[in-house]
Amino acid sequence: MPKPGRLGVGIIGAGKVGAVLGAALRAAEHAVVGVAAVSDASRERAETLLPGVPILEVQEIVERAELVLLAVPDDALGPLVQGLAKLGAWQPGQLVAHTSGRFGVGILHPVRAAGAIPLALHPAMTFTGMSLDLTRLPDCSFGVTADPAMLPIAQALVVEMGAEPVAIAEGDRALYHAALAHGSNHLVTLVAQASELLREVGVDAPETMLGPLLRASLENALASGESALTGPVARGDAGTVAAHSEALRELDGGSGGDILEAYLAMARATARRAGSRGLLKPEQIDAITRALEAPGSDGPIPEEGP
């Protein structure tokens, strides 16, 4: 016998996020009444994670569902919501949730105007679109935004999916999403750049060398914050920093490639943050800053200290 309060759920967007969250809601005994999937990959994903769920047109899903989950790209969300509003598709009392990190419930204004209930449920997790993702949800947090009276509904849906809801104010959504993108997306770029440099010097399996180091660094940073910082910048070792920047300039042929740009930007940011926390003296920060300059642009490169 189904649990009380079970909903008929419609999934619009069977991408990596939509299909997984649909499967999680189904595991909580909600009924997934339909899924919109256009590409071959999304159809295959829907068949794998939501077997037996019919693939329907978007408007038909909205007509059938008590909870509509909009798992579409950020830039597609507004036009989709407005287009369905023009068709008169939204229904009074219907729950409409999107999974965008960037937006709160403001973008769902046409939903609210039709008497439906807007919710923002963004999983702070990177997804593969496979069943493995379901095992990661218990360790995952969702950034949740809703009207105060409806916040418990949003939180309950997240808890039912096995995750932890964290309330994010409407005006803070862009900064919230920037934090996650900066930490997650740029980490991938950082690992790719470090791997490229190791291959450049003949390391055939950079992931084997980087894996233990990066996992330890991440665990230490999460546990201890910036007190876990090590390395030449944190030590004020300007000579080593100068050697790094010179080697990267030589590798790029002086063209200022993306690895050099990223190294310089992160080294400067690291020095500033270390200084603001009393880990570096002002003169050490100055030495690091000079070490990061191109030769001849700001005086001589400082000698390495004892």
Image (tube, rainbow, N blue to C red):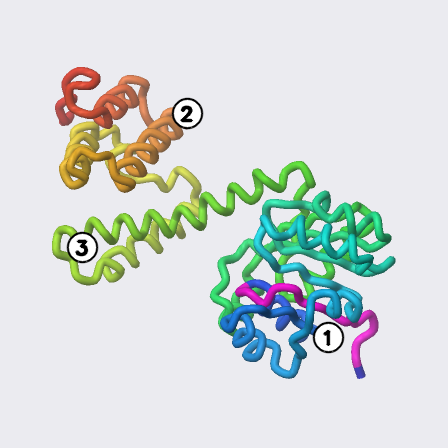
| CA separation in Å, label 2 and label 1 | 54 Å
Element on which disc 1 rests: strand
Task: Identify whether 304 is placed above or below 80.
Answer: above
Task: Identify whether 246 is placed above or below 223.
Answer: above
Rendered residue at 80%/84% (across/down): 1
Foreground residue, 28 or 60?
A: 60
Q: Amino acid at mark 2?
A: Ser
In the picture of the structure, the residue carrying the numbered disc 1 is: 33
| CA separation in Å, label 3 and label 2 | 35 Å
Circle 1 Cα neighbour tier, 10 Å, few/some/many (<14 / 14–19 / ≥20): many
Q: Indicate left or right for 141 with 116 as reference.
A: left
Which of the two marks, 3 or 2, is nearer to us in this view? 3
**Residue 276, numbered circle:** 2
Rendered residue at 84%/60% (across/down): 91
Q: Position of residue 196 (x, y in %)?
A: 23, 52
Q: Amino acid at mark 1?
A: Val
In the picture of the structure, the residue carrying the numbered disc 3 is: 199
Circle 3 Cα neighbour tier, 10 Å, few/some/many (<14 / 14–19 / ≥20): few
Q: Indicate left or right for 41 with 196 as reference.
A: right
Instruction: Name the image quarter holding the C terminus.
Output: top left
Foreground residue, 237 or 117?
A: 117
